[in-house]
Image (tube, rainbow, N blue to C red):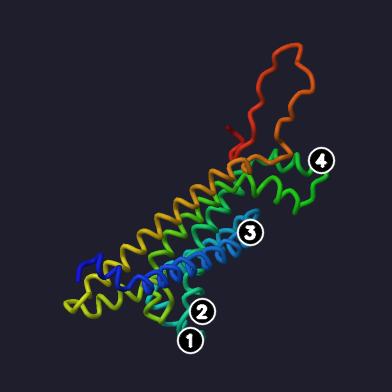
Amino acid sequence: MTFLEYLQSRRELILAQTLEHANIVLMSVALATVIAVLIALATYRNPSARATATGMAAALLTIPSFALLGLLITPLGLGYTPTLVALTMYALLPILRNTIVGLTEIDPALTEAARGIGMGRVRSLATVEIPLAWPVILAGIRVSTQMTMGIAAIAAYVDGPGLGHQIFSGLANLGGVNSLNQALVGTVGVIVLAVVFDLALALLGRLTRAGQRPKLFRARPARRPALTPTAAVPSPSLGGRE
């Protein structure tokens, strides 16, 4: 049976496993984003705290995936839950590190200006700091997505969802009927999903580019023509330069 014939004969199963793979990656990255951003917001002003948070996230990333998934079997069992927990742990570091970098590189003059017009801490974060740091945060999300896409295939080891079942079945029966087709379907499927997710996140970055500049600091159009030409004022960016 050729590769295309195998795809045709197993299309429903492959489609279901592809959707499962995409779902578990999406859920784990979304959960990691929430956790990482909250940790970054709580620690980025304190050098020792942010170093500790980054170090702990880096330590989690050094744990071999097979070992971590195996250790999670005892408390969480098999299937979706240990896969989600493991992928979330692996996705934390790039998002956490980029969020801290994005927030610490904001020009302090912008946050001072926000406080000067009466903004509270939460409003300043929501309307000034996070929008300015968003491009750097999104870059971390893209890295985490690509990384967890491949690790999610190993989740078949604990009966997790996704295309890893195709890869594991093919490798376990290497030399048998359709074993190569199974391994190829799983591998190519992961690659295609990784490309699709990265393009989607790149598009999200383009669509949200306007959010990089806080509304507070956007220039307002003049109500009447200026009598004399004035120098353009550069808009704020992550480093205070355009």
In the rendered image, which quarter is residue 165 located in?
bottom left
Q: Secondary structure at mark 3?
A: helix
Tell me the tag on residue 81.
2
Residue type at tag 4:
Ile
Foreground disc of the pair 1, 3: 1
Residue 201 location (% of width, % of height): 50, 52
Residue type at tag 3:
Thr
Q: Which residue is mark 1?
A: 77
Residue at mark 1 to residue at mark 2: CA–CA distance: 8 Å
Residue type at tag 2:
Thr
- Which residue is nearer to you in this view: 5 or 211? 5
- Which residue is nearer to you in this view: 226 or 120? 226
Residue at mark 1 to residue at mark 3: CA–CA distance: 33 Å
Q: Upstream in the sequence, badge 2 or badge 3? A: 3
Residue 56 location (% of width, % of height): 52, 67
Residue at the spot x=79%, y=19% of the render?
224
Quick check: 60 left or right of 216? left
Residue at the spot x=45%, y=84% of the render?
78
- Which residue is nearer to you in this view: 53 or 3? 3
Residue at mark 4 to residue at mark 2: CA–CA distance: 46 Å
